[in-house]
Structure formats: structure tokens, C-alpha cells
Image (spheres, coloured by chain):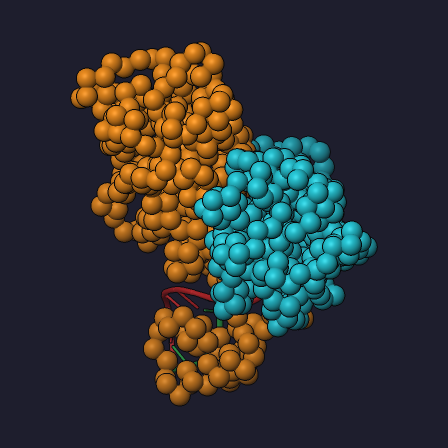
Chain colours: A orange, B cyan, C green, D red
Amino acid sequence: MKNTVTIKDVAKKAGVSISTVSRVINNSKPVTDEIKKKVLDVIEETGYVPNPLARSLVTKKSQLIGVVVPEVSDSFVNEILNGIEEIARMYNYDILLSNTYSDKNEEMRSINLLRAKQIEGMVMISWDLAKEHIDYIENCGIPTTYISKTARDYDVPTVSVNNEKATYDMTNHLISQGHKKIAFVMTSAGDTRLEKERLDGYKSALAENGIEFNEELVRYGGVDYNSGYESTKDILEKGIVPDAVFVTGDEAAVGAMNAVFDKGFSVPNDISVAGFNDVKIARMYRPKLTTVHQPLYDMGAVAIRMVIKMINGEEIEEKKVELPHRIEERESVIKK
Amino acid sequence: MKNTVTIKDVAKKAGVSISTVSRVINNSKPVTDEIKKKVLDVIEETGYVPNPLARSLVTKKSQLIGVVVPEVSDSFVNEILNGIEEIARMYNYDILLSNTYSDKNEEMRSINLLRAKQIEGMVMISWDLAKEHIDYIENCGIPTTYISKTARDYDVPTVSVNNEKATYDMTNHLISQGHKKIAFVMTSAGDTRLEKERLDGYKSALAENGIEFNEELVRYGGVDYNSGYESTKDILEKGIVPDAVFVTGDEAAVGAMNAVFDKGFSVPNDISVAGFNDVKIARMYRPKLTTVHQPLYDMGAVAIRMVIKMINGEEIEEKKVELPHRIEERESVIKK
DNA sequence: GTGAAAGCGCTAACAT
DNA sequence: ATGTTAGCGCTTTCAC
């Protein structure tokens, strides 16, 4: 029923040795044109497809790249995934996918599972990647690129945008629109470099414009809708009414907008709201979300290209790739 | 660097034959407790992991299931994917993912790629699956479950909700809220059974309530935001102002709401809008979308369970699985 | 330029 | 209960 025709069958039918067949399918050694044609014909005729398992067993190349993600259904994740998938396919790699639900144990389990499957490389997407896991991966020698808030702290290949600059830019934009009291809702909780960078970007924009930093205006939470909602609600319930709230994630920013609505204010008339990432929902929600655009598809594409380079033993000129961001002005921020 | 310890190494170190090692790791034949412990110790100590490639080569089992999807970033798709992923992992299968972007050629390419990778089974998610592709898959003998608007027309395993009933229910709900002039925006274009079922559901609810069917109120389009937007805009621009618009997809329904807004109407005060699927955005958008809830996660879970059953040669009692739906009343539909 | 043969790491008869 | 051996389908020396 299934593809049961092997290299042996082809060899026999073509009246040559299996080595010759191997040579023509891999173009590994010169073969007489005539004999090559013959073999190709037989392959065509029989519908022979080389068994990659057998091939991998000897070459130690699986043409498999593992991708571990916190959750496919997160839009930040799946827009990156699109880029990974497309480039991988271009290079004839297949993607082995693994969800971790941001669970540390699941994450380790995924790594091991993928490793056992003989993946040649890996793209690791994680909100909050533990140092031990990075060490473990690096120790296994699996060529890996990281897209993670935390991985940027270590000497491993990562791709991201310039978060400090991006945060700075948006804060500045908000200020330029006349906003002074700007709440800052961060979609991360730990003490990571990314967080520090973002906070720095926020603070320095404030400072440059002579606005005093106010700890009460900042919140730490998760990337999801709910975190944004709760953080913003909390601010409002503390009696603070900011001019604008800047949330470092779009789904969370939508949560923030809803919290503003639910507290009886209007976006953007009473309070402006800005996001970060520019995922699909930023364009679908009304008011359309003003946000920091990250080239998510490209980030995935670049990440997997780096992995493939490493697999091929090529040197990576730049371990810390930073892609350009921009402020995407839409409707949720207006001049005050 | 990488896991280079093989079964041979373990055998030598444990002072037994490789068959014995094989037996303990597979629990395939009885082994003396003492010797088993010894082997286990060595495995522990060396960090030995069996090479699944070699194993697959002989057993002809790859523990790989292919999943082909139109696009990971579609929320309908990725919520299903979550279910697939989790159950697959439970059964120790890995997921090989392939995006088709709804392109017929890419779809065929994906099938062949996955097949070459020796997948044992497949879940096929497609908006509009060609008969030839189904035939091809079935002909290859790859155990496959389909989640597709079109596959339900054929004698292959599928999972879905009862679309006629679901459409009927929502239309009825709308009518019960006092709506009479109900626009029906479908997220499919072809002449498929699903489409017919949905249209039937819509029509029969109308008929039962003595409302005349009006061709001018129905539109055919895609599943995306934009299709919903354009279809609804078109209705409004034809000078038709419906009481409600029922869109058979949530992202498209959000598009519909925005079209309503952009034409100067309010949802739900002027026009009610209902969706289908109940994906994340239905809960995030304001007004929250009243929609037909489909158990997407479960659909994925069931689909892959069916595939695994087929792989194991078990009989599938029910080829056409229908999961329960329900009307999720939120804010976008109100009494007229 | 082509074929023979070894071997990748493992499982599954077949012996013992 | 354990060891020996023959492959699984392929690539790759190594001869010719």
C-alpha cells in the first residue's frame, strides 16, 4: 500500500548497483548520462522516494528542526511561527513543534523529546527561559536561536528588536502627543535584562522631557489579555487616572482598553492606550491600536536562518540580531 | 558532543548483549530483575537515549503525525492545534507541522513531504479540500482525520459540530430576540455540503418563524477579517440595513462589526452581530461577540485520537464525529 | 565511472 | 532468560 519501493528495487529494475542509484539521487558522484537517465526513468516510473530515516541514520542529518513555543495560540508566537515555517520549508527542513504552556518541566521535556528525535537545530521561543535550560541546550550542542525575553542576557544567538529604543520611542511619542501621566504596564515579571531595558527606555524618555518617574504608574504582569486588564483596572481603582497607558504587548493592551471602558472611561478620548508587537488583533480592534510594530514574521525567518547556518557550520557574524521596529500610529492614541 | 552513546556502549558497559538492553528499554521480553537493574543503572549513568531513527527504520513506526493547516496564525486553526499537540504528546507522538496558505499546490507538496518523513498518520485541516487530495491521501493509506468544510462530503473520518443545527440555533436565537431582517455572511464560497447545511439551517429557522428568505441578505466570502468586513460593507452600501448580521466565523464577524461602525451604525444598538467558532477574539473584542461556541480544543483532541486509533489498527466506531455546540450569549446581540 | 561491502543503531527472529 | 545474527534502507569508502 504505502511507498514500499526501495533503492534496491530501483537498482534491480535499472540493472545497476544501489551505489549508482544513490549517486544519481544525491548527485554525489559523476554518473554516465545514459545510465543516469535510465535510473531517473525507473525512479519516475516506480514513484520511488528515498527513505529519509535510513538516510538520516547514516548521515546523521534528520532535516528536522525543533521549535518549542509557549503556546501556538498566542498571536505573537504564531506570527513568528509563520516565518519559521516558510523559511524552513525553503531549505527543506521540517518543523517539529512543541508546546510548553510556559511550564518549566514541559519545557525540559520538550527539549529532550526533540533531541531524541534527532533534530539538527532548534528555535526556542519562551517568555521566561531559565538559565539552566539555556545551559542544558548549549551543552547538548544543539544549534539554537532564542526568541525570549530572558535569553538576551546570555551569550547565545537571539533575535529581537531594540527594546529599550522601542520603548523609548513609544514613550516619547506619547509625550509628544501631550501625555504626561503615562502608566506603564509591562508584560513580564522577572528581573530580566529585557525588563530593565524597557523600563530604562520608558524612564529616559520621561527624564528627557522633564517628567518625573512615578513608581505607582508601573505594573508587572503576563503577556495575556487578562494581565493587561487586571493591571490597568488596578491602576484605575487606585484612583489614578493616567493620560495614557503603555502596555508592552497587544493582547494585554486590548485588555487594558477594556479595563478603561469598564471603568467608564473612553479610549482614546479620556485615556490613550498604546501596545507593543503589532499582532493581528491590533488592526482588528476598535479603536485600532497604536503600537510598536515588530517584524514578527521576519524575526521567525531570521531565527531559523541562523539555525540553519549554524547547522551548516557557518559562522554567525552577529549573535544578537536586532530587527527594526517602528511606531504604528493608529486610533488608540490621540493628542491630549 | 551530542548523544553519541549507543545501545552497544550500554551493552558493553553492563556486560550483557545488546538484545538484553533492547529488551529492558522496550520491556519486550522478561529480563532478570538483577540484570535489568544493572542495565538501567548504566543507562542512567551514561544518559543513553535510544535513537528513534534506527528504531523506526526497523519497526516502521516513526511516532510522527503530520498536521497540515492552512495557516498557524488563524485562531480557529491554532486553538485546534493546541488540542492536537497536547494529546499527541500524551501518546508519545510528535507533530510535524505544515502550512499550506490554502494553496492547492502547497497542500499536495505538504502531503508528500510529510509522507516522505514516514508519518504514521495525519490530521488535515483545510478550508476547502479538493476531492483529489482526499483520494490521494486515502490512496496512500495514511490514516487521516479531516477537519475541513469540504471533507464532510466524503466517506472519510471527520470531526466537526452539527453545522446545520448550530446555524439553525443561532438564527433562531436572533429571531427570538426580535430580529427579522437577518443578513447571513458565510465564510465559504464553494458549493460544499457544509455550506448547504448552514444555509439550510438558516433557511429553516427563517421558515419556521414565517420569515421570508431573501437572497439579497446572504453573502459568500472567506474566513478572514477582511471578507467579513467587505461583505457587510457591501450589504450596507446596497442600502440594506438589517436587524442583525450573522457571520459564520468570528474574525469575519469582527470585520462585520467594524463595517457596521464605519457605516455609522452601532453594534448592538442599531444592528446586532453574531459569530461562529468562539475563538479568543470573541471574548476580547468590545462589544463581546455573541457566537456559536465550538469546542475547538476538543475537536483537535478528538481528531488526533482518531488518527492514533487508526494507526493502532483499531476500529473507528463513528467516522463522522459531531461535537456539541452552544450559543454563547454575550454583548453583540440584543433584543430589538 | 561503477560495484561490493561495511556499517549507521536498532529490533526481532532464531538459537541456546 | 540471554546471546547471536540478520536485516531495516541508505551512504560511503574502497577496490576495480
Q: As drawn, is A213 to the left or to the right of B314?
A: left
The picture places residue A276, in percent across and down from the top left corner, at 36, 34
Q: Quadrant of the N terminus of chain B?
A: top left
Q: How many marks?
A: 0
Residue at figure coordinates x 62%, y 47% from the top left: B244
Q: Name the residue nearer the viewer: A320 or B170.
A: B170
Residue A101 placed where, x, y %?
54, 34
Q: Nearer the viewer, residue A236 or B64?
A: A236
Q: Residue at x 55, y 76 (%)?
A: A47
Query: Residue B239, relative to residue A137: is it above or below?
Result: below
Residue at screen point 58% across, 64% down: B189
Q: Residue furthest front?
A: B239
* Residue A178 appearing in the image: yes
- Pick the residue in front: B144 or A131: B144
Q: Is residue B313 visible?
A: no
Q: Nearer the viewer, residue A66 or A208?
A: A208
Q: Can you give x and y, in whole percent of width and height, for residue A315 in the image?
A: 25, 48
Q: Is residue B279 left or right of residue A169?
A: right
- Apparent side of residue D7 relative to residue B320 in the rendered image (left or right): left
Which residue shows up at 66% across the image and 61% down it?
B214
Image quadrant where residue A278 sits: top left
A154 over A68 or under it: above or below? above
Image x and y of residue B330, in percent: 63, 35
Q: In the current view of this chain or complex, which residue is farthest to the bottom?
A: A34
Quarter assignment of residue B211: bottom right
- Looking at the picture, does residue B28 appear above or below residue A247? below
Image quarter where the C terminus of chain B lies is: top right
